[in-house]
Image (cartoon, rainbow, N blue to C red):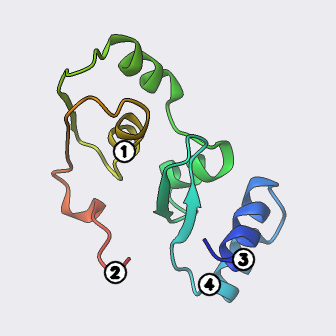
Amino acid sequence: MNIVDLIVAFLFRMNVRGASRFHTLVCGGRRLNVRSKHGVAFKIDPHEYVDGFILRRGYYEEEVLDAIRSSLNPGDVFWDVGSNLGLHALTVAKLNSGSPIFAFEPNPKACIQNP
């Protein structure tokens, strides 16, 4: 993460008026390098709903992660179908390293074309 991404992320997290405009002017609207509250690195677009939620709150659908972690035993296979940016799959991989993980996103528009 670079200092510009840290500053822009801070402005969004603090809900500073003009953060969106500042992001566009300084970063050209590019995705920001940020970490979730569980330490997983992502390139996110703060103007997208899920990405913005991760940026502002640290994670999206924490209750889903809690349910996954409570039912996943070591060695169980975890399938994340419709993974979007892979939030749950990557977080489970970091927190439950003993489980094989497969993530699929069938929507090609969800792919990052130019990271």
Q: Which mark is residue 90?
A: 1
Per the model, the C-alpha gap separating discs 3 and 4 is: 12 Å
Please report the residue visible at 72 percent of the width from the left and 77 percent of the height from the top.
3
- Spot occupied by residue 108 in the image (x, y as percentages of width and height): 19, 62
- Three-letter residue code for mark 3: Ile
Q: Which mark is residue 10?
A: none
According to the picture, the residue beneath numbered tag 2 turns out to be: 114
User: Label 1 neighbourhood size at 10 Å, few (<14), some (14-19), many (20+)?
Assistant: many
Q: Residue furthest top?
A: 71
Per the model, the C-alpha gap separating discs 4 and 1 is: 26 Å
Asked if the residue under mark 1 is in contact with the one under mark 4, i.e. CB atoms within 8 Å, the reply is no
- Spot occupied by residue 8 in the image (x, y as percentages of width and height): 72, 70
- Three-letter residue code for mark 4: Cys
- Three-letter residue code for mark 2: Asn
Secondary structure category for the residue under label 2: loop
Determine whether 75 is above or below 5 in the image.
Answer: above
According to the picture, the residue beneath numbered tag 4 turns out to be: 27
Query: Would you say 14 lies left or right of 60 here?
Result: right
- Spot occupied by residue 91 in the image (x, y as percentages of width and height): 42, 39
Asked if the residue under mark 2 is in contact with the one under mark 1, i.e. CB atoms within 8 Å, the reply is no
Q: Earlier in the sequence, mark 3 or mark 4?
A: 3
